Image (cartoon, helix red, strand yellow):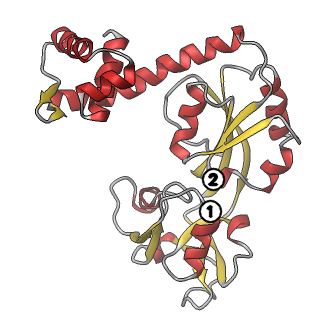
């Protein structure tokens, strides 16, 4: 498949309009229509309905392939561009919210770094397409197990830290006096749904029951990357939150109870393209690893 045609197709679906896609891509509307027709001819099946502009079942399946394919092409271009580009004045570090902890901040130099806080799933893509030189990503894992990252590019992942987890409860919660808690005790509890600031609830379900598990109902949804807001919502009784022990400790009007079972840790990894970061990114990577 011609990647230019594929990129046009993804843009038309995203904007649900041939004319809007033409403006976004700098083409004429006629050229966009020709791109879609050529792609449909190549694949031998209709991909888009015209009124309204929505993907057909085959087009929906193509979208599942298109995102990773285009990102992989962007990653290849970004990886090779590093060798030809002149040194930049700053290094861009993309980090998921829970990966930005005191140890991370202490490792940053006084100048020359741009820190971008992104939802967890967007960090590998930012490193892959070159919009970030380095990435810090976190997640739940069994002790010493690597994180499961999307296969978006030949990324190198280096373990930086692991720490215990704790359930954050309001101070007056019936379970606040426990020495430790099991996820099995909390299946029917009301949880905060904060997939960007905290851990997605489907990850808790998978840790308890395996894929497709039930329970862990969302009481309130927090759409943002501010961990402090998430902790304050838990302290105010809007739902439970699972957090790294260092983050959960010391939250006003709340109690952090260690997670005893299953055996999970909060793991943070450093991401970069290729074998070793280049130029000034290598020095920042060294500081973070240290």
Provide the secondary structure element on which disc 1 rests.
Answer: helix
User: Which is more N-terminal, label 2 or label 1?
Assistant: 2
In the visual, does 271 lie left or right of 173?
right
Image coordinates for residue 144, horizontal then vertical, percent:
67, 46
Q: Residue at x 33, y 55 (%)?
A: 212
Residue furthest right as drawn:
110
User: Pointer 1: what residue?
Assistant: 227
Q: Are marks 1 and 2 in contact (CB under 8 Å)?
A: yes
The answer to whether residue 143 is seen in the rendering is no
Closest to the observer, 26 or 34: 26
Mark 2 closeness class: few <14, some 14–19, many ≥20 residues within 10 Å = many
Res. 97 mark: 2
The answer to whether residue 38 is seen in the rendering is yes
Res. 275 mark: none
Position of residue 150 relative to residue 175, above or below, is above
Distance from disc 1 to disc 2, alpha carbons, whole Å, reads 7 Å
Count of numbered tags: 2
Position of residue 57 relative to residue 159, above or below, is above
Provide the secondary structure element on which disc 2 rests.
Answer: helix
Quarter occupied by residue 130: top right
Q: Quadrant of the N terminus?
A: top left
Image coordinates for residue 269, horizontal then vertical, percent:
67, 41
Q: Residue at x 85, y 50 (%)?
A: 106
Mark 1 closeness class: few <14, some 14–19, many ≥20 residues within 10 Å = some
In the visual, does 224 lie left or right of 117?
left
Image coordinates for residue 285, horizontal then vertical, percent:
79, 33
In the visual, does 166 lie left or right of 187?
right
Image coordinates for residue 241, horizontal then vertical, percent:
55, 70
């Amino acid at each position: 498949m011609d990647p230019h045609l594929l990129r046009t197709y993804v843009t038309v679906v995203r904007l649900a309009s041939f004319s809007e896609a033409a403006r976004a891509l700098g083409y004429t509307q006629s050229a966009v229509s020709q791109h879609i027709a050529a792609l449909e001819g190549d694949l031998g099946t209709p991909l888009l309905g015209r009124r309204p502009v929505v993907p057909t079942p085959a087009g929906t399946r193509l979208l599942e392939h298109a995102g990773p394919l285009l990102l992989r092409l962007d990653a290849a271009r970004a990886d090779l561009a590093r060798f030809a580009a002149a040194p930049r004045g700053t290094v861009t570090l993309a980090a998921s919210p829970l990966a930005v902890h005191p140890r991370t901040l202490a490792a940053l130099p006084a100048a020359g770094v741009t820190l971008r806080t992104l939802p967890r799933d967007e960090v590998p893509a930012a490193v892959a397409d070159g919009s970030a030189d380095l990435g810090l990503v976190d997640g739940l894992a069994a002790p010493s197990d690597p994180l499961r990252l999307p296969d978006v590019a030949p990324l190198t992942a280096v373990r930086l830290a692991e720490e215990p987890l704790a359930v954050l409860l309001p101070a007056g919660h019936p379970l606040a006096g426990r020495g430790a808690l099991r996820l099995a005790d909390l299946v029917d509890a009301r949880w905060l749904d904060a997939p960007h600031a905290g851990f997605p609830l489907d990850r808790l379900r998978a840790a308890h029951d395996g894929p497709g598990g039930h329970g862990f109902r969302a009481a309130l949804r927090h759409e943002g990357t501010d961990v402090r807001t998430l902790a304050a919502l838990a302290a105010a009784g809007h739902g439970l939150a699972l957090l790294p022990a260092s983050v959960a400790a010391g939250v006003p009007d709340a109690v952090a109870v260690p997670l005893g079972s299953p055996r999970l840790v909060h793991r943070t990894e450093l991401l970069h393209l290729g074998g070793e970061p280049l130029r000034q990114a290598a020095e920042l990577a060294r500081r973070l690893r240290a």
